[in-house]
Image (spheres, rainbow, N blue to C red):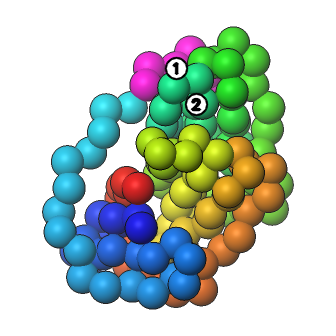
Amino acid sequence: MAVVDTVGGTFAVDLETGEVAPGEPFEREPEPVLNLPRVIAAAAVGATVVAAVDAKPPLLVSHDAGTTWRESGRGLPRGSAVTIAAADPDTIVYAARNRLYVSRDGGVFWTALAGELPEILALAV
């Protein structure tokens, strides 16, 4: 389940079905400080770090706490937020302007969730 803060309120989104329901406001996790250019948003859980950047592809992923990086998300639009599931660091949720994308394999493959939301500001899993 993802909780998404938008300009139109907070929503809960089921990552399996894409169903959207009203959600409760949440406290945003502090973003890691990264020495990368053009970072829009970032998240870290353990050694997994993901940065949404203003570039193509729009994501950089590290599985060694930022020592090395690989590009991810070819074909995805520019993003506004990213988060990693604490219980499963291979599950990453990326937010474009009004749509969520999910990777369950550490950012190798991405699936778009069907529903569109108001403009996304932040998200958490």
Q: Cβ–Cβ below 8 Å for labels 1 and 2? A: yes
Q: Which residue matches tag 1?
A: 34
Residue type, mark 2 in image: Val
Instruction: Judge whether 9 appears above or below 105 on screen.
Output: below
Q: In which quarter of the image is the N terminus?
A: bottom left
Between 66 and 91, the residue placed more toward the observer is: 91
Q: Which residue matches tag 2?
A: 49
Instruction: Judge whether 80 appears above or below 119 on screen.
Output: above
What residue lies at 67% left-to-right and 58% top-to-bottom?
103
Magenta segment, which residues? 32-37
Looking at the rendered image, the disc whose residue lies closer to the viewer, 1 or 2, is: 2
Q: Quadrant of residue 8?
A: bottom left
Please state the horizontal and vertical placement of residue 29, each as a whole percent of the image: 30, 39
Label count reads 2
What's the distance in space between the residues labelled 1 and 2, CA to CA?
A: 9 Å
Please state the horizontal and vertical placement of residue 9, each as a whole percent of the image: 22, 74
**Circle 1: element type:** loop
Between 49 and 9, the residue placed more toward the observer is: 49
Residue situated furthest front in the rendering: 87
Q: From the viewer's perspective, tell me whether residue 119 is left or right of residue 30.
A: right
Within 10 Å of disc 2 (Cα), the crowding (few <14, some 14-19, many 20+) is many
